[in-house]
Image (tube, helix red, strand yellow):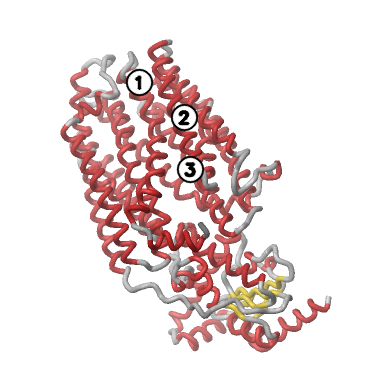
């Protein structure tokens, strides 16, 4: 299926069929990933290690997430960058970014080992380990830490494998590792009586299996090939990938912050209560693993639907977007209500899967706190799922500000302050009530943001200009013009094209890109205009925007292949960097000149003109940086830089004279 057919498929196929096709593999992958986090605790809890063993793994869990944050940042970033390079037919940058990503993942794992090993006791104590559980936690952590490079590389490589078009291989890697872990846990814990060391060894052997399967794939990749040169660090290519993985890093580190603060408060107020330190830490550890399964179901559905959402937003199929949102929301609510019913009716049955509390003084307190935790802490889990789904939905539609707000309002703005304040008045139960209160507040915000956004989805897709075609031209020089807003660079380019008798492309590129991708031409044209002032990079990294960018790049290359022409804007100078006979020009002008031109052309006031020039140039610079990793307007990126205040015709004459001189040589 070619790109055009794939676009039509996303825009016309039955939504339920698309959701099954795209979401089921994603859900399965996330559930398999959750197995790694839950299996050890089940076997540990049902062994002689019991509740203290679960408390020990609970305090190690946030450190796993720190490692995962770096691995997913590098892996998801390289995966997204690989997809972009695939669309642009860029075979050079992808392998360099991936090779550098592997090196950076390895270095990050070694740095984490060097930092964590000497500070392990202090670190685990900080995360809630008590005098009763610290020995078990250190025993488990020592073995896990020794294999951080394997664990992190496996996570990083799996993301790239999925992006390379082999999600089944990625899932098989994780699934086989989880199966090995499940098989070895009872052997090491019950058969050989290796305790916490046995649980840790089973985990890392499973991770080694996953790593080896992933490593084998890297010798048979589809769209890129790693060589020795790939592992010579190329930070320019990697920086582009790193920006695309930043959201994954922020998400994981948010989990770490929440776990840290929550465990500290549980240890502090647990010590003041009838439950002690170990029971709350053990129960919250179990709760987090169970909750991960529930939230992964929701996240898998909406993540799988991201390409469908992104395409239909770009194509302005707004009714279809709303229908898709309703379908995802329905699935989310069903999952949330089913989980709520289970947690409210049978919390003991859920916690009982993780064994009996045989090694703590008052087992009855264990069950009391378990019931309270699941019935109070997770009472609004439907809201939690909906808030997470809403955040990912906003990412898919290219609204990073709303995505950040809907995500952070629950976890950072509400939950953390509440677990710091409520226990002062209500003891350890105050920590449990912090979650539903945060969910309730964040849900109001999420609903408000969603309702406001849905109101903006009006109108229909503009008609593609089918009569816009790439104009025939003779072989010769390709002129690319980048320009400051108000510098009249577009007008200068038009004059040059007329003087040289070659085609001129500006708005025509967006119409052609719309034909190429199936996206709406106004959406493509307004990429910079829609970029929020403080979040250019996040906006430009969203999947729907990247889809539009790839379509633009394809069209720019097709235009260049047709012969000599003038191309204005859209980072064409970088897109055509490997083409011969490209003359790169940057047009600038003094502030007063630009303001006067903007006021004349657009009818802006002086204040509005100044604001629009600043906003437009910031957006163009961010776009160029996102596309190329270079600085927009940096003189070393251009053959000619012209001050247009000297006169438009004069600038055009300078360019034409340069072209004639260039052609003679």
Q: CA–CA distance between discs 2 and 1?
A: 18 Å
Label 2 close to label 1 by CB (< 8 Å): no
Mark 2, residue position: 176
Residue hosting label 3? 167
| Numbered tag placed on residue 43 in the rendering | 1
Cα distance between the residues tagged 3 and 1 = 29 Å
State whether residue 589 appears in this view.
Answer: no
Place of residue 276 in the rendered image (x, y in percent of width and height, measured from the top left) = 25, 23
Label 3 – label 2 distance at C-alpha: 14 Å
Within 10 angstroms of label 3, few (less than 14), some, or many (20 or more) residues? some
> In percent of the image, x 49 and y 57: which residue is there?
541
Q: Residue at x 45, y 66 (%)?
A: 531
Q: Position of residue 481 (x, y in %)?
A: 63, 75
| Residue at image coords 49%, 77% | 466
> Callout 2: few (<14), some (14-19), or many (20+) C-alpha neighbours within 10 Å?
some
Q: State left or right for residue 355 relative to residue 147.
A: left
For the question of whether residue 642 can be seen, the reply is yes
Q: Residue at x 23, y 46 (%)?
A: 334
Residue 354 in the image: state x and y as whole percent. 29, 23
């Amino acid at each position: 299926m070619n790109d055009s057919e794939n676009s039509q498929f996303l825009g016309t196929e039955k939504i339920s069929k698309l959701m099954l096709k795209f979401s089921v593999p994603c859900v399965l992958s996330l559930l398999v990933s959750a197995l790694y986090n839950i299996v050890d605790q089940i076997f540990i809890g049902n062994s002689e290690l019991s509740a203290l063993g679960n408390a020990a793994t609970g305090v190690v869990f946030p450190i796993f997430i720190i490692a995962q944050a770096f691995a997913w940042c590098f892996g998801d970033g390289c995966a997204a960058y690989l997809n972009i390079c695939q669309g642009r037919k860029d075979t050079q940058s992808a392998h360099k970014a991936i090779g550098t990503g592997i090196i950076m993942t390895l270095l990050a794992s070694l740095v984490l080992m060097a930092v964590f090993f000497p500070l392990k006791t202090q670190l685990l104590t900080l995360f809630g380990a008590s005098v009763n559980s610290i020995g078990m936690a250190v025993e488990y952590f020592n073995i896990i830490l020794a294999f951080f490079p394997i664990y992190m590389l496996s996570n990083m490589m799996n993301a790239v494998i999925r992006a390379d078009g082999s999600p089944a291989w990625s899932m098989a890697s994780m699934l086989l590792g989880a199966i090995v872990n499940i098989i070895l846990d009872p052997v090491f814990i019950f058969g050989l009586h290796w305790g916490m060391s046995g649980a840790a060894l089973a985990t890392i052997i499973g991770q080694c299996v996953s790593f080896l399967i992933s490593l084998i794939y890297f010798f048979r990749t589809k769209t890129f090939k790693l060589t020795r040169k790939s592992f010579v660090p190329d930070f320019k290519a990697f920086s582009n990938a790193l920006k695309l993985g930043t959201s994954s890093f922020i998400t994981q580190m948010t989990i770490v912050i929440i776990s840290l603060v929550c465990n500290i408060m549980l240890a502090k107020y647990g010590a003041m209560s009838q439950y002690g330190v170990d029971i709350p830490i053990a129960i919250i550890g179990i709760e987090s693993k169970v909750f991960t399964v529930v939230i992964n179901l929701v996240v898998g559905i909406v993540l799988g639907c991201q390409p469908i959402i992104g395409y239909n937003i770009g194509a302005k199929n707004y009714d279809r977007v709303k229908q898709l949102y309703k379908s995802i929301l329905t699935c989310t609510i069903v999952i949330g209500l089913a989980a709520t019913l289970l947690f409210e009716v049978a919390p003991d049955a859920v916690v009982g899967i993780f064994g009996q509390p045989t090694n703590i003084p008052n087992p009855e307190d264990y069950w009391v706190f378990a019931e309270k935790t699941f019935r109070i802490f997770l009472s609004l889990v439907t809201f939690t799922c909906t808030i997470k789904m809403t955040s990912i939905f906003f990412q898919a539609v290219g609204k990073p500000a709303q995505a950040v707000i809907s995500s952070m309002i629950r976890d950072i703005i509400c939950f953390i302050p509440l677990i710091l304040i409520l226990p002062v008045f209500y003891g350890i139960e105050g920590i449990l009530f912090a979650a539903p209160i945060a969910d309730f507040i964040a849900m109001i915000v999420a609903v408000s943001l969603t309702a406001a956004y849905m109101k903006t989805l009006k109108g229909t897709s503009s008609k593609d200009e089918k009569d816009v075609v790439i104009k025939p031209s003779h072989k010769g020089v390709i002129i690319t013009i980048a320009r400051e807003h108000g510098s009249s660079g577009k007008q200068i380019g038009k004059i040059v094209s007329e003087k040289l008798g070659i085609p001129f492309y500006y708005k025509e590129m967006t119409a052609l890109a719309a034909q190429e991708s199936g996206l709406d031409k106004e959406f493509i044209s307004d990429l910079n205009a829609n970029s929020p002032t403080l979040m250019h990079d996040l906006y430009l990294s969203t999947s729907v925007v990247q889809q539009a960018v790839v379509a633009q790049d394809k069209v720019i290359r097709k235009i260049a292949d047709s012969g000599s022409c003038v191309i204005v804007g859209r980072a064409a100078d970088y897109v055509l960097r490997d083409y011969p006979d490209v003359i790169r020009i940057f047009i600038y002008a003094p502030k007063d000149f630009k303001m006067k031109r903007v006021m004349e052309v657009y009818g802006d006031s002086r204040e509005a003109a100044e604001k629009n020039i600043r906003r437009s140039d910031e957006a163009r610079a961010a776009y160029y940086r996102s596309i190329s990793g270079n600085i927009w307007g940096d003189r070393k990126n251009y053959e000619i830089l012209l001050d247009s205040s000297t006169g438009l015709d004069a600038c055009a004459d300078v360019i034409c004279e340069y072209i004639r001189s260039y052609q003679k040589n």
